[in-house]
Image (spheres, rainbow, N blue to C red):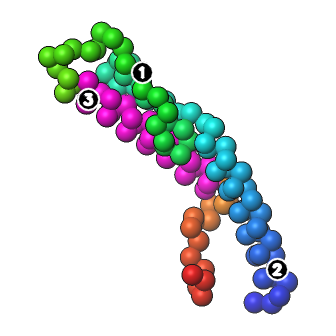
Amino acid sequence: MDMKNLQEIMKVGQELQSKMAQLEGSLSEREVSASSGGGMVTATVDGKGRLKSVKVDPTVVDPADVEMLEDLVLAAVSEAQAKAQTEMESEMQGLAGGLPIPMNIPGMP
């Protein structure tokens, strides 16, 4: 590999790194929501999957069936996190132009 090719690879790598840093910043501001129980419980996470809020319809609160409410909350949070993960992976693949992330370059740690 000659120096010109190496310099081009380094430039592309730096540009990709910059774009990924911008994406990381925007993910914290993005919100992804998912519901369970026909909309009775809604969870909202940021683009990185961190839980931001949980909304529970008061009609689903039954002191005799707390386990159902717990299951609905878990389902909504899990779905919101999965959606956020899918969106993040899709955007990162778009930035990388189909290159595998992380890239395994021989001789690099």
Occupied quadrant, residue 11: bottom right
Occupied quadrant, residue 31: top right
- Quarter containing the N terminus: bottom right
- Using the rendered image of the protein, determine whether residue 6 is visible from the camera's viewpoint: yes
Q: Is residue 108 left or right of residue 86?
A: right
The amino acid type of the residue labelled 2 equals: Gln
Quickly name the residue at label 2.
Answer: 7
**Secondary structure beneath label 3:** helix
Occupied quadrant, residue 21: bottom right
Question: Can you tell which of label 2 and label 1 is closer to the viewer?
Answer: 1
> With respect to residue 34, does 26 lie above or below?
below
Q: Is residue 49 left or right of residue 41?
A: right
Residue depicted at x 48% and y 42%: 50
Cα–Cα span, label 1 and label 3: 13 Å
Quickly name the residue at label 3.
Answer: 70
Q: Nearer the viewer, residue 50 or 38?
A: 50
Quickly name the residue at label 1.
Answer: 55
**Secondary structure beneath label 1:** strand
Residue depicted at x 49% and y 47%: 85
Q: Are marks 2 and 1 in contact (CB under 8 Å)?
A: no
How many neighbours does mark 1 have within 10 angstroms: few (below 14), some (14-19), or many (20 or more)?
A: some
User: Which comes before the other along the chain, label 2 or label 1?
Assistant: 2
Cα–Cα span, label 3 and label 2: 54 Å
Q: The magenta stretch spans which residues?
A: 69-94
Question: Can you tell which of label 3 and label 2 is closer to the viewer?
Answer: 3
